[in-house]
Image (cartoon, rainbow, N blue to C red):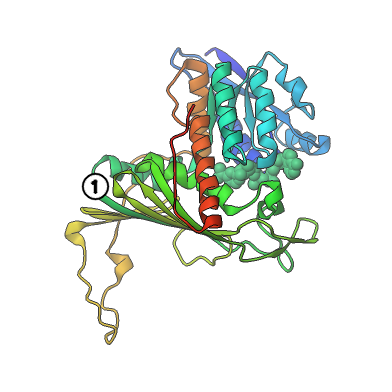
Amino acid sequence: MTARVPIGIVMNGVTGRMGYRQHLVRSLLAIRDGGGLPLRDGSVLWPEPVLVGRTEAKLRDVAARHGLTDWTTDLGAALARPDVRIYFDAQVTSEREKAIHQAIEAGKHIYTEKPLATTLQGAADLARAADAAGVRHGVVQDKLFLPGLRKLQRLVDGGFFGRILSVRGEFGYWVFEGDWQAAQRPSWNYRAADGGGIVVDMFPHWHYVLEQLFAPVRAVTAQVATHIPRRWDENGEPYEATADDAAYGIFELDGGVIAQINSSWAVRVNRDELVEFQVDGTEGSAVAGLRGCKVQHRAATPKPVWNPDLPVSHAFREQWQEVPDNEEFDNGFKAQWEMFLRHVAEDAPYTWDLWAGARGVQLAELGLQSAREGRRVEIPELHR
Ligand SMILES: NC(=O)c1ccc[n+]([C@@H]2O[C@H](COP(=O)([O-])OP(=O)(O)OC[C@H]3O[C@@H](n4cnc5c(N)ncnc54)[C@H](O)[C@@H]3O)[C@@H](O)[C@H]2O)c1
């Protein structure tokens, strides 16, 4: 039988939406269901989750649902265990910094949800502390692993676009206010004091998508709004929404690429997917969503003529060609977990470290500054 190498992983925030569904069930337990993670030396890495949270009853419930027995409300005790090698954080953003510092001090490798922290200073301090302690570190950048964006990456790598001119992103959907229909996102997302806000939430995603697929982001101009100022929480109580729920951003990338991304929780969807990116290049264009990606080559570009006196003569959406999968795409969170586990277990390369996380927080912070001051803000290199 293949040698099974257990690896203890503290999972903090495992009762939350992301911690439970994407990270525990769809990633670590899915890896176990698949027989563990095969390593180069022929052994198999076996994740042993240690569930950590604030409420005993909730942890017991999650554990029982999956036949797990290892859970505690005492983070310090979990971090003191020698069989625990990794600390993972999917708590509310405002609780993250303190807990990760504690885990670094305990000498654990760090893997975390984004945003890494609520301020750039806090994020950079974490990255520095992790480097100084010599632990491995990574931040979730799940969108890069989605089929639509993987296909987009393939187009970039294959030189499909020629010179890339612009990127247009549209993200959002209607998040119910919570009075007559329950809101489908946690209420802390709409309170600034609790680490909420769409800029803090989404700009870190846009940062790694732009940086990894296209080029580093050099400047940001943003306008933000709180379109829905009053919402109702999980208990049906009204509260004041103090955080931004929409952001309209322009991002200037190296090489002159202009990216424009709208993010909103107060928009109704008239798109094929909840997020879509259109990329226009001299040789061709593409529209990528979470799953699909379609292209239009230069040679197949129609020539519409502006004439409002005549009805539209083109079926524009039908003039695009679907990019084939050509491979099987696993859950994006799981795919990234596997890379991080290999990074820890056998030194495999891994790019998306806490510094990448800090750059995402930096973009959010400077985006908010741009909105506050009504001006374009340049993005300096982070000093390690
Ligand atoms: N990668 C992604 O696509 C993605 C998507 C959504 C959220 N996130 C991030 O994941 C993290 C969790 O988001 P979520 O949507 O799962 O939130 P959630 O509210 O569903 O879960 C929050 C978790 O934090 C715990 N927690 C600890 N201290 C808390 C406190 N003081 N108040 C409230 N909860 C507390 C909760 O018990 C729960 O386990 C956030 O940092 C968020 O930015 C990432």
Drawn side of residue 250 relative to residue 264, left or right: left
Q: Residue placed at 31% from the left, 42% from the top? A: 154
Residue bearing the label numbered 1: 160
Image quarter for residue 55? Answer: top right
Location of residue 3 by image quarter: top right
Q: Position of residue 376 (x, y in %)?
A: 44, 53
Q: Regarding mark 1 in the picture, which secondary structure is present there?
A: loop
Measuring 25% from the left and 41% from the top, which residue is drawn there? 158
Residue type at mark 1: give it: Phe
The quadrant of the picture showing ligand 1 is top right
Name which quarter of the figure residue 63 lies in: top right
Which residue is depicted at the point 59% across and 23% down? 129
> Is 28 placed above or below 152 here?
above
Query: Which x, y percent locates residue 143?
Result: 47, 44
Percent position (x, y) of residue 316?
A: 30, 69
Residue shown at 73%/69% (left/top)?
180
Question: Is residue 274 something one can see in this rendering?
Answer: no
Q: Circle 1: is it few (<14), some (14-19), or many (20+) Cα within 10 Å?
A: many
Between 202 and 9, the residue placed more toward the observer is 202
- Apparent side of residue 271 relative to residue 151 in the rendered image (left or right): right
Q: Is mark 1 within 8 Å of ligand 1?
A: no
Percent coordinates x, y for residue 148 in the rendering: 40, 48
Residue 201 higher or lower than 85, as above or below: below
Q: Which of 218/324 is in front? A: 218
- Residue 167 can be seen, yes or no: yes
Q: Residue furthest bottom?
A: 309
The residue closer to the viewer here, 89 or 273, is 89
Q: Is residue 318 left or right of residue 13?
A: left
